[in-house]
Each structure stands twice: as structure tokens, then as C-alpha cells.
Amino acid sequence: MSNYSPSQFHTNKRVGIALLGKGSSNHLHRVTVVQHFLSGGFQVHFLVRQDYSKLIKRITGCQYHDIDIVINDSGIAGFLRGFLRYFRSLYPACDIAKQYMFRHQNRDRPIVSRTIHFTIAFFARYRRILQMLIRAESVLYRNVEVTGLPVDNIDVLCLIGCGGNEVLETHLGWWGRSKGIPIINVVGNYDNLSTKGFRGLFIDHLLVWGQSMKSDAETLQGICSNRIHMIGPLRYDHIQSSICVSKAEFFEKCHFDQSIPTIFFGGSRASFHYFEMLSVFQLLSNKREYQLILRIMPNKVLLNSPTMQAFITHARSLPNIYVSIGDIHYAHGDQFQEPLSVEEHELWHGLTYSDIVINLYSTLALEACIFDRPVINMWYFEQPDALILKQPIHVPYNVEAHIRRLRSFNCAVDVQTREGLVAAIHNQLEDPQRQRDGRRRLVQHECGTLDGKAAQRLVEHCRRAGEIKR
């Protein structure tokens, strides 16, 4: 990684940063990122999804543009775009997690449909075929229009991800390419390159966290090594400095006692696990006193459901339980788009001051390891109702590529029953140092360098990209 001082360069360039989902706001809409861009001579233009225009907290010194990405999805072109997105989503079709999902989704289809989908999945094994299809796919995005932003306002465009499952970013990326704007693709989450299918864009500059992501970019996504640059994780680079209140102050807000063991639970889109964790907590509390932070996933459909509304009201009425809402704006914005903002104050402080973290193979496991907290991966589900003809399909996060990698470091305990969860909580609390080395090695492998200079490296690569004309 290169050393960079922001005062070295005075570019007077204009960088456009797309804020179209929580990935972009988590990593790019940060004061530290903006400060480095401004001190590096950039004008910062945030391109904001219209439904979040009034909700986003603005950073001083930037310009915000409400943009609308317009593309006609009717006709044969719209059909082909959707078909190719599906085709790419199956890659790598030989991966065990992809095969599990494909088998379960394909089993109820008619024989002709199953045959067609099987044929598509067969060809989705081969990276070279997908690389050729991207060239064909580029033709289908020639009619993308972006309203709310004159093209001459932007010298460099910064996007999260590389067009795997980021539909809006894919559209904006093709638009920017058609206008000759250099594009920087920044990897957001640590499973972005390994589980989200094949990329949907040509990549000129890909900024990844560390060696693990660099390997995924080369081997899975077929991106040339000279286009991949390790900068570290923007979201986690200053994470320790974000702890601004003491344990006493934070626990006072939660109505907690500092002497009582505290469990942090981060759930998924399924409401079952929140109810189950509450039941487990009550079982534990029969023998000794515990405290529980229930972190509700930032998912609008989940948070707006009557079931979760009732659960939140009930949980908040119970002693020794604090409910933390991941999306404080869940009642607003497009309910079928991912949220643009994620609450971080309670998240980081909760991880810092808890004694143990329980999750469902989510990014929270990595974040807990960054804070050196014992981790339990909970992986069991509600027993299916015999009266329901079509049983739910659970995404096999426990065998996805990035989770297989996580498990190889022996940094967490996996449980598949309620009894196993209760026992794991007792064991982890008795010996919290047991998997410390595994947690350290995971963070080092996935995050690369956490030296506070990730934003500086981002600015440097944006400057370089702005000087290169395609």
C-alpha cells in the first residue's frame, strides 16, 4: 500500500459518489472520507437516491444531488437485462452454496423450465462465457439516463461494488462509462466478490480491503491484477476512534449494570430468531442475571411487519433488554430498496462493551472479531409447519465461500440447536480468550491494514483515475 499525504496534490477535480444503498453510505458517506477528498483538492458531489433526499444527514463542504436513474425495462432489451442478471447471479455455479439454492429453487419448476434453468446454470460455471456476455450486455445499457446531474459536473465517479447484485450502481456505471467518466469501484462488504455472482461492469479501477479480496477479484471475477488495489476497509479504518462514550454512559442509556454479563445479538431477516433469542435469554436468566442487546437488522420489510412491531414493543417492556434498531428511518423511503443508512453509534458501542456476540453468519461476526469479542454463529430454524405445502428455503450462509473462510480460522463457535446455543454462551463467557488468535488472524486476512489511511488511498486512486483518459 502506498503512502499518501493529502496536501501533496491539488487537483480541483470533481468526484461523484453514488449513495444508492447502505453499502455506499457505510463506506463512502463518512466525514473522514470527505475530509481527505477536500484536503486533496476535490469537490465532493454525493448522488443521492431521491427517496432518501430528506433523510440523509449532510456533511459540511459537499454538494448533494437528488438523482433519478431512468432506463426502459420493457421490451426485449429489458427482458435480456433481467435474464443476464439472473445468469450472472448463478456464478460460480459449482460452488456448494450456489448449488444448494439452485436445487431448492428448481425442484418445484415444471420439467421444461427445470431443463432450461439447468442449462443456464451449467454455462454459469465458466468465467470466460460470462466475460464475453458482459460485452454483449453493455449494448443493452446505451439508453440509461441520469436526471438531476449534468454530466460536466463529474470528473471521477465512485461506485460501491462491481455490478454483481447492485442494480442501480450497474446502471449508473454504464451511464458513466458512456460519458467517458473514469470510474472507481470500491468493494463494500467482504462477501461482495465471492457470493454475489459475476460482476456486471467492466472494471478499470477496483479498490479492495486486503489480500483475500484481491484473490477473489482475480480468481473469481477475472479482473487483471494491475487494476486491483488494496486500500483497507473504509468503514472500519477509524472504528476504534468512533467509541466516544464510556461503558458507564452507554450502559446508563440501556439501563444496564456494568457488573452483569452482556450478550449482543444481531438477527437476520427472519423474525423467528429474535423470538428464539428472547426465549434463550429467559432460560439463561433462570440461573443467573444477564443483559441482552437485541439488534434488529436494517431491513424495511422486517421492521414494518406487524410481527416485528409487536416483538419490539414487547421486548422493550422487559428488564435487562435493550432493543437497537439498525435502520432508524425504516418507516420512510422505498420499502423494497435496501436502506441508505445504518445506525452505527449503538452498533459499535454495543460490540465494544458486550461480553459475547451472537449472529447468523453475518458481517457482524467479522465486526465482533475486530472488537475482539467471542462470537457464536447461530444456525437453526423454526420447525416447518406440516400444513404448509411449500416450505421456506433458507439461504445457506453457513457454507458460502466467505463463511467457509471465516470458519477455517477457528474464530467462532457454530451452534445448531437451542441446547447448543445455551452451552456455547456459558463456554464463551467462561473463556473469552480461547479463540482470540483466530479472531486476530481473520481480521488481518480479510481487512488487510487498519492504519487509518484507507481514505487517503481512495483519494489518491481517484486523482490518478481522473488523470487517465480512456
Image (tube, grey):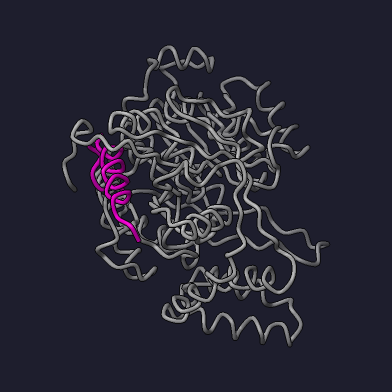
Q: Specify the quadrant of the image occupied by residue 212.
A: bottom left
Drawn side of residue 309 relative to residue 45, left or right = right
Based on the picture, tell me whether residue 459 belongs to the magenta stretch: yes
Residue under the point 53% across and 84% down:
122
Q: Where is the C terminus found, in terms of image quarters?
A: bottom left
Question: x%, y% of residue 270?
Answer: 65, 48
What residue span does the magenta drawing correspond to? 447-470
Residue most extreme to the left: 3
- Identity of the residue drawn at 75% across and 40% down: 305
Q: Residue at x 48, y 54 (%)?
A: 176
Which of 426/29 is in front?
Answer: 29
39 or 190, nearer to the observer: 39
For the stretch drawn in magenta, what is the main secondary structure? helix
Residue extending farthest right: 387
Asked if residue 270 is positioned above or below residue 6 in the image, the reply reads: below
Residue 179 visible here? yes
The number of numbered badges drawn on the structure is: 0
| Residue closer to the observer: 251 or 302 | 302
Give percent across and percent down for residue 367.
39, 40
